[in-house]
Amino acid sequence: MSDVTELGVAAIRDGVAKGEFTAVEVAQGFNANVAAAQIALNAFIVATPEAALGAAQKVDEARAAGQPLGKMAGVPIGMKDLFATKGVQTTAASHILEGFTPQYESSVSQKLWDAGAGMLGKLNLDQFAMGSSNETSYFGNVISPWKRKDGGNAAMAPGGSSGGSSAAVAARLCPAATGTDTGGSIRQPAAFTGISGIKPTYGRCSRWGIVAFASSLDQAGPMARDVRDCAIMLEVMSGFDPKDSTSLDLPVPAWEAALSGDMRGKKVGIPREYRVDGLDGDVAKSWDQGIAWLKDAGAEIVDISLPHTKYALPAYYIIAPAEASSNLARYDGVRYGLRDLPDGAGLQDMYAATRSAGFGAEVKRRILIGTYVLSAGYYDAYYTQAQKVRTLIARDFDEAFRLCDVILAPTTPTASFGLGEMVSDPLAMYLNDVFAVPASLAGLPAMSVPAGLNREGLPLGLQIIGKAFDEQGVLNAGLAIESRAGFTAKPERWW
């Protein structure tokens, strides 16, 4: 039997169903990879090999009994440690939640288990999903499996906040993983590590049981080796949930069955505002190559304008911290998680001590920003204005989609950077999300697919943005690029 850990979601699902190998053999292979890479990559906060084996045994028993198998039967996955998992520690990579063990399951993870998937463990991330490099986790940095060509042994950023997910999929520690995307946290790490990832339309996947960062932006999605695997997993993760008031009450399309790389009759918009000054040469070249690939697939290329793009990042960094300030007020040391109670301290002292010890520097920075823009004297000047800008950005997309079916842009302004290279400059770090944030503010589906390697041998991603509810169009354009890019590069094993 060939190495099952080189297989993706579709190949594992189909192989198990045909009896080419057992689900237990798959789980054992990935469990071994997780254990072997943990010290070097730090992708998992908690490994759950028994859970993966237990789910696999159920799938093998069901197959032996001739019972129907779920869409993810036999596929072990990594679960970003932002999703509540019953009986398994859920921390959001923060000290303030260390030791918190939910007594309930998030809606998305429950759907995956019901479809036959198993859990290899809880994946590391930027603390409370706040970060673009996976350097803000209380449990240590995640290290990308990729290295610069001839660039020494520098540890590279796997992207963030879903850096544990991207590193684990790229390093073959799991065939797929869950991610969440608030302002690019699925797409940017996918681009940095040479994998695919899709943020669906806001409301496609239930937010119930996911630790909240910015409630009007947060959206779960899959990260996997290729477009088909993302389509399979997204079908399982999506669907109406009455426990989430923002959940879309719409049927889940058969995205996998309808996959097609034929772009004839489709128009692809190229936003002129994304040609920013100083755009990395390799990124610009890959974008031009992506345009040529979609032309080859039959698409018509049209020039479009998204005039309020330049305001997206500042608007995002007002709205998201404001919502974080409100959401993170629940961590008070009273009900769950960390409690720091100095001798003779009163209630306010306990709040202050707990939050001071429990939150990391980036989380504190965003809470302070958010509290400031929500304060009485500044609410209208900052928060209200940012919401108006958000409306204008959404309107820009509505106007653009009168001229095109999907939009093509780079996922990130650069390839991955070395850990520590940007941590002292928060604004430079925030600029990593400049191409990802507009689609998040508008609630649109957007995907990153690998486009090739830059001159340093590091992956670059291309981003497809679609109309609301048109995940199919995004996936199809991604497939057209994927089939022409022929991206087969993977990190050389050093861990």
Image (cartoon, grey):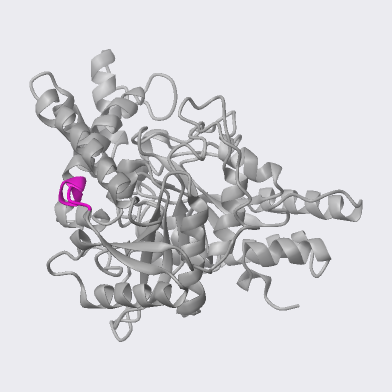
Q: Is residue 110 above or below residue 345?
A: below
- The answer to whether 250 appears left or right of 467 in the picture is right
- Return the residue nearer the eye: 190 or 424: 190
Q: Does the magenta stretch include residue 309?
A: yes
Residue 50 image position (x, y, % from top left): 68, 50
Q: Can residue 411 be seen in this view?
A: no
Horizontal side, residue 48 vs residue 116: left or right: left
Residue 94, compared with residue 495, is above or below; it is above
Residue 164: percent from left, percent from top: 44, 56
| Quarter of the figure with the N terminus | bottom right
Q: In which quarter of the image is residue 97?
A: top left
The picture quadrant where one finds residue 363 is top left
Badge count: 0
Q: In this view, does 171 lie to the left or right of 397?
A: right
Residue 392 at least partly seen: yes
Q: Position of residue 269 (x, y in %)?
A: 32, 61
Q: For the point 46% across and 41% down, which residue is it?
A: 82
Query: Which residues lie in the magenta part?
Result: 306-313
Residue furthest right in the image:
65
Residue under the image location 51 percent in, 67 percent down: 479
Q: In this view, does 343 lie to the left or right of 31?
A: left
Instruction: Give the dominant element type of the magenta stretch: helix, strand or loop.
Output: helix
